[in-house]
Amino acid sequence: MGVLKAIFDFIQYQVLGMKWLDTLIKNGLSSLGLDTSTRLAGSIEFFVYDVIKITILLCLLIFLISYIQSYFPPERSKKILGRFHGIGANCVAALLGTVTPFCSCSSIPLFIGFTSAGLPVGVTFSFLISSPMVDLGSLLLLMSIFGAKVAVLYVVVGLIVAVIGGTVIEKLHMEKYIEDFILKASSVDIASPDLTKKDRLIYAKEQMLSTLKKVFLYILIGVGIGAVIHNWIPEEWVALALGSNNPFGVIFATVIGIPMYADIFGTIPIAEALLFKGAQLGTILSFMMAVTTLSLPSMIMLRKAVKPKLLALFIVICTAGIILVGYFFNAIQAFLI
């Protein structure tokens, strides 16, 4: 048992967490005469370490996920989803969202394509919720910071929110609130060409580079904010706003997160810094979910595809789910960390 724990700890802290990199950067800064116990040098250490770590993990994960995704192009995904009905279809759509390494804005074109193809609106909304909120990349990145229990449970509850959200929309028969141009769009079912292993590797590389270009700025911004929180914001301030003594911390974090635009990779360093400063786990996760699922730019894009009543329902369902998830994680934090 001890051997298994040692192996697991090595994977979590040295492989995923890259603590060896942190030590290397500290030694490098020390050799330059910088004391990493000071705020400025500590901020530099946090920034360099997190940017390199997240970029490496991002490239590896997106390459792997994109290679897997090459077996599930939109046409094949439509066929897969078309075989299921009822809540089973919502579950499959939510699971399909986990293998699409997209932010909320990137997920909306696929949502439109699925809806145009005649898939039930509730099913497509389950995909739309899960795609930016939970994916294989978020699982491993969260594991590197919060541990396996938190990471796995985050993905599970995210899938539950996606399934419930899509099911509620389906039961309320909201199809009439999809914009007419989408409902009337013709869907051409093109058989996906057989790709060689070399083609899939090239596709994975292109997706990795494309995704890195899209999110790298947000990684820099997120790590920069995280560095400021980690080294310059007093713990008392964070604990007051997001700690256990504030019963409205989850709601506050969710409301703050909604107008922002980033993906899981940009929010990870902020979450790491907030946890270090004493913010509650559920409050942090609610912030991350709100940013990745309900960003203002993605809601503007979604409004082009759906009418205001359906958009409002989507926002209400996601917000309520995110807040409930936050309070759930806060309640069981002691058992997870």
Image (cartoon, rainbow, N blue to C red):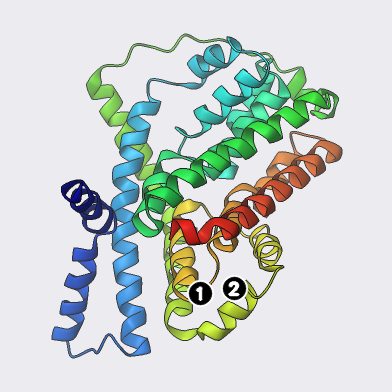
Q: Are the residues flagged by discs 2 and 1 in contact, CB closer than 8 Å?
A: yes
Name the residue: 71% across, 40% down: 302
SS class of the residue under badge 1? loop
For badge 1, the amino acid type reads Gly
Q: Position of residue 66 (x, y in %)?
A: 37, 33
> Circle 2 sits on which residue?
243
> Circle 1 sits on which residue?
278
Q: Position of residue 242 (x, y in %)?
A: 61, 72
Q: Would you place residue 123 above or below residue 229 in this image?
A: above
For badge 2, the amino acid type reads Gly
Give whichever of 322, 305 is nearer the camera: 322
Residue 317, numbered circle: none
**Disc 1 packing (10 Å; few <14; some 14–19; many ≥20):** some
Give whichever of 8, 124 is nearer the camera: 8
Q: Is residue 274 left or right of residue 176?
A: left
Q: Is residue 170 left or right of residue 330?
A: right
Q: Quadrant of residue 110?
A: top right
Tell me which label, 2 or 1, sits earlier in the chain.
Answer: 2
Task: For residue 106, say whether it is visible.
Answer: no
SS class of the residue under badge 2? loop
Total numbered circles: 2
Q: Quadrant of residue 203?
A: top left
Task: For residue 316, say whether it is visible.
Answer: yes
Q: Position of residue 313 (x, y in %)?
A: 80, 40
Residue projecting furthest to the left: 31
Residue projecting furthest to the front: 1
